[in-house]
Amino acid sequence: MTHPSPPALEACDLTLAYDRSVVFEHLDLRIEPGQVTTLIGANGSGKSTLVKALGRLMTPSAGHVELDGVPVRRLSARQVARRVSILPQKPLTPSATTVRDLVSRGRHPHQSLLRTWTKQDADAVDAALVATDLAELSHRNADSLSGGQLQRAWIALVLAQQTPTILLDEPTTFLDLSHQLEVLRLVRSINRQRGATVVMVLHDLSLAARFSDRLIVVGEGRVLSDGTPWQVLTPDLLRSAFDLQALVIPDPGCGGPLVVPVEEEYVGSDTQVRAG
Amino acid sequence: MSERTQMVTRPARVIGAERGVGRRRKRTRLHAVTVACLGACIAAALWGVLAGSSSLTVGDVVRTLAGGGTRAQQLVVLDLRLPRVLVGLLVGASLGMAGALTQTFARNPLATPDILGVTSGAAFGGVAAIVLAGGSYVVGSTLLGLGLPVVAALGGLATATVVYGLSWRGGIDGYRLILIGIGATATLGGLTSYLLARAQITDAAAASQWLVGSLSSVSWSSVRPVLVVLVVIAPVALAQSRHLELSRLGDEMSSGLGLNVQQHRLIVIVCAVLLTSVAVSASGPIDFVAFVAPQVARRLARTGRPPLIASALVGALIVTGGDALSRGVLPGEVPVGIVTTAVGAPYLIWLLTRRKEREASS
């Protein structure tokens, strides 16, 4: 499959490091527009680091990131923020701030000292509140929300930013399964209805497979595997990347690959291992 | 609570029509609080001109201000009390705004400009100027030539610069800055004590009095530096308001929203440091103002972070009112620094125990 349009984001010969510990070296990666791409990998494999670098939160030691074909270092922080939004792992919830005010912060890149709040901003915030089913909670203080509601509020903020590309770093952490599904269905609808390019980091492999067009497995400072969920999630890869012995079977809930970890005493019984 | 329940059950389309109502109500409250604080400042300033050992009536003061009055009245009102009240207002406003800036950037309601090392640096400079100037040291006579306010301001600026420089590691991390600031404050506190212990008894007494923070030695020449710095810095700080609001979401979220975090932080720190240095150089370190004023303003206005203008006005009110109180009511002219501590510390404790705080999450 070829893509005539330029990639939404592209990492070119990227080297990322904290002080002297190198996380990625000479990494090349294209994020195709209009797709949901999910980064998976073991703890400490550098998924979050990569997302931060793609979102301009981290300066690469070498190489560069291109946004719609333009190197991001040539763009101002505000210009980048109009094209890429990023939800980091641990944003701080401000006190005495209503949900509507919190979501309104997403309009910051579209405002300036001269151009302040407009009807367009208010409409974007309203649309984001409705899309995340928060309209009825919009007058509540953000710090009084439950975990699932708060996560929806952060996603609403990102939606109000109205960027063609959205980066989400572990948007489902600390949520129970039904709230994880709620958030991921919301992400999928943003992708399908607005054509937004989504790059996210997830830990649950089966959920990653269910909600992504493409999976990228990172580890050992490089990309270990890259492709559709069925291409990527193989028992061999799970063993090498996650040190996990597992079966991959068709998910009866959606038809995608389902990762089923195996206990030692059951290995060798009559279960078939299916490699996509 | 009933209001909240009502909000929750209200249909979405109604909220759509009423959007911005809560925001507007919040702003109205902030404006009302600001105007009320301004009125209170003016009242405190008038009281400050009236209060004192030589009893003047309101009529005397008005006549003198209008150009009349006896020579003695002119001396008391125009040369002694008016500059004192003005410096009180300006110093209080500077400390209040510096406190609001520091508490917001540090994301900590207990933070004051002291954590940047600026107060201890200015205090050390001031004490050094008083104590060493009397001796035969070369340093001492050079310091004397510059004058106490300049040395104190330089001490504050130099310390803040060193603290900032030591915290720099490809950018400023708020926590590292605070830790290094605490280290600098402890070090300079020790050095200040050492100077006091070695000093002549008269110098030590003068230095100790200055360290408490007092408006008793101010004159018209003290007004200008604080006024200039406040007039220049206040608009710069106010222009950062939106960015201060954004920075409450954390460094990563706010830079993702297009904020240049390092640049914003540098501007805020420079503003807080300049305001504090010039305030301390005019009056000595007046404790608790930068700490209490922003919290009082925030509670009155019910905002998420201390509002800058209201914090400045509450600071001005505390210092001017405290000074007038010490001259008009308390026996033997207690320094204003003692009054602010005596009033400010219990008030803060009362506020903290009275209300359930949600600061932990921010």
Image (cartoon, rainbow, N blue to C red):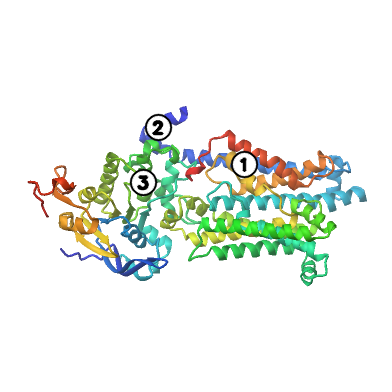
Query: Residue A207's spot in the image, x, y percent?
Result: 23, 47
Q: Which mark is residue A192?
A: none
Residue A89 versus residue A80: which sits nearer the camera? Answer: A89
Mark number displayed over residue B8: 2
**Tag 3 and tag 2 share a subunit:** no
Residue labelled with disc 3: A156
Q: Secondary structure at mark 2?
A: helix
Return the residue found at the far top. Answer: B2
Chain letter of disc 2 in the image: B
Q: Amino acid at mark 2?
A: Val
What type is the residue that disc 3 sits on? Ala
Residue B139 % position (x, y):
76, 70
Q: Can you tell which quarter of the image residue B329 is in?
A: top right
**Residue of label 1:** B296
Q: CB atoms at circles 3 and 2 under 8 Å apart?
A: no
* Residue at disc 1, secondary structure: helix
Observer able to see residue B230: no
Task: Compare residues A86 and B70 and report the one nearer the observer.
Answer: A86
- Distance from disc 1 to disc 2, alpha carbons, whole Å, reads 30 Å
Give the mark nearest the N terminus, 1 or 2: 2
